[in-house]
Every structure is written in structure tokens, then in C-alpha cells.
Amino acid sequence: MSILHVQDLGASIASISPLSGVSFDLERGEIIGIVGESGSGKSLTAMSVMGLLPLIGGRVDQGTIEFDGVELTKISESDYRKLRGGRIGLITQNPMTSLDPLKKIGSQVDDVSLLHLGLDKAGAKARTIELLSDMRIPEPASIYHLYPHQMSGGMKQRIVIAMALAADPDLLIADEPTTALDVTVQAQIIRLLGDLVKKRNLSLVLITHDMSVVAQTCDKVMVMYAGTAIERGPVQEIFDTPQHPYTKALIACIPHEIAGGERLKGIEGTVPGVAQYPSGCRFHPRCALAGDICSKDIPTFEKGGKRAVACHFALEAS
């Protein structure tokens, strides 16, 4: 049984609908990568699962989000608060703003265990030091007493991960967890997340714009564009035989060793804003394969085994 099952998810903010037709499954112990350019709807998908859309004046108005057999769109906010930070942990993209600068590192991690696990202060401190050690932070008993400004960006991100793990969650959602870090530290954090999933039998939703991270880390991938899912499947199959032109273009953009003078590849145009979503397939203004049908008819999410793609010309793209 899936730990997380999202079916035909749609969301609205005021009078606009920035998210529609998002469907995916995640088993226990699996990592799914949600990938796409900025503005594709990746973070809105995460906020929908976490029940955080009301914070930006939004709501889920279509589809279902089932977590371990519980339909999240039907539970109360008080029940949601028990899940958030408890059974569902969130790793945010900017550790610089995720930590309270006025509180010591240890007390910030302690707070999660105190709230969700009901530990006393001594038990929470012992758990925090153990988590800091699991994060491969040297001298965790000393780090416990430091303030955020006394730590590097990579160390702060490890603290944010420790906070997400403090209540022993079943599901982690990591929203661009390495964006603010340099390349070397990014690789360390991604490896750490992969190891934690295996060690703790967690499930992880990894939101990223980096296809190379998906290739190295994830079991499956969902590609998003302009607020909707356009392709989904096992990572190896998606990279070997991408069926959507956008997926194929993203993979072609992965940096590789190139000859002198050769330019890195890109995708012409930009992701449209919500108010400018085109009719039909939302990618058709940027697609080399687009025909008349693409501007008129919305492609359905055609499924074949574990694969799914929404494209009128999927076979020609693969």
C-alpha cells in the first residue's frame, strides 16, 4: 500500500488555478523526484500535501491526497497540525531563514521532540544529540549549544534535516533542500538524504530543478510544467526513453563534458505565468513537435504500466 497517494490534485488561489491534474504514488522506502523549471508547480504540490495552502490564501479544490490511508483533504486543521512535523517532516530550501537566530540549535530541535513525542527535556536533549550525530555533525554535544550564526550554511541545513526527523516521521518532503548551498555541500546533503531514507525506511518527496540530482538519488520521477504533471515513471526508464518533449529537453540540459566553444543546451522561452497559461497543452508554444491539436486539446495522462505521459505526440518524442 502506498504511504502517499495523490490523485488528480488541483488547487486554487483567489480566482486563479495554478495547479491541476497532479497524480503520483509513493511507497515506503522510496524517493520520488518532482522536477521542473521555476513556476512549474513543484512547491505548490508540496504545500498542498502539507496542508499549507491556506497560508497563501489557497485551497485544494480538486482530487485527493491520501497519506497512509487517511484522506488529508477531509481532516481538520488541528489533526493536520499533529501530522505536520510529526509523521510528515518538511525540509525547507533556505536554512538561513528556517532557524530562529535568537535560539540555540539544540533547543530548536528539542522543541519538535517535546511537542510530538512527549519527551521530557532530558530525553529530548539526548535525542537531539543523537540526531546531530546521525547528521554527521562533529562534536554534536558542543554544537547543541551554538546559535545559527555560528554555523556554516551546510551545517544549518543538516540542523533543519535533524528537526524534520526529530519526531520520527514516515514521510519527508524536501523542497529544493540544496538551493542555497555550494556544489560540494549540495552533493553531501543529497547523499545524506539518500542514506537516511535507507537507514530509517522513510519515504521522500524530493523537489528539485536539477535532473542530475534526480538521476543519482530517486527511484521514480514526476515531471511538472506550468502547474500540471506531464510525465511520470521509474527514473531509469524516464532517462533512457523520455516520452514528453519537455522531459527530453530537460535531460538534454544536464551539464556534461563538452568540446571547447560548444554551448550548454537550454530550452527556448519561459514557463508562462498562471494568468498566461495557453489553451491545450501548456508546453506547446515552446515545443518543436507541436501541431494544431496541441493548441486545442489538453492531452490526457496516458498510462502504460508504471509510466504515464500527457502528450499528443509522445511516441515521436521518445
Image (cartoon, rainbow, N blue to C red):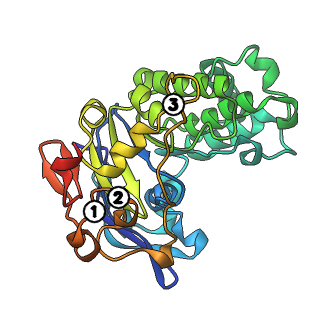
Write down the residue under mark 3. 255
Query: Which quarter of the figure has residue 228?
Result: bottom left
Q: Amino acid at mark 3?
A: Pro
Sequence-first tag of 3 and 1: 3
Where residue 16 appears, x then y in whole percent? Answer: 47, 80
11 over 179 or under it: above or below: below
Viewer-side residue, 22 vs 36: 36
Q: Secondary structure at mark 2?
A: loop
Query: Which residue is the extreme one toward the top?
Result: 139
Residue located at (49% from left, 68% from top): 272
Crowd around label 2: few <14 · some 14–19 · many ≥20 (10 Å): some
Q: State yes or no: discs 2 and 1 in contact (Cβ < 8 Å).
A: yes
Of the pair 294 and 111, the residue shown nearer to us: 294
Location of residue 23 in the rendering, given as x and y in whole percent from the top left corner = 29, 56
Asked if residue 119 shows in the view, the reply is yes
Q: What whole-number distance in Å separates the C-alpha atoms at marks 2 and 1?
A: 5 Å
Question: Is 68 positioned to the left or the right of 133 in the image?
Answer: left
Tell me which residue sits at (43%, 46%) in the image: 35
**Residue sitting nearer the eye, 217 or 146:** 217
* Label ID, residue 287: 2
Q: In this figure, which residue is indicated by the disc labeled 1?
A: 290
Q: Residue at x 46, y 31 (%)?
A: 212
Name the amino acid, label 2.
Cys
**Tag 3's secondary structure?**
loop
Q: CA distance from mark 3 to mark 1?
A: 26 Å
Identity of the residue furthest to the bottom in this view:
15
* Mark 1 crowd level (few <14, some 14–19, many ≥20, 10 Å Cα): some
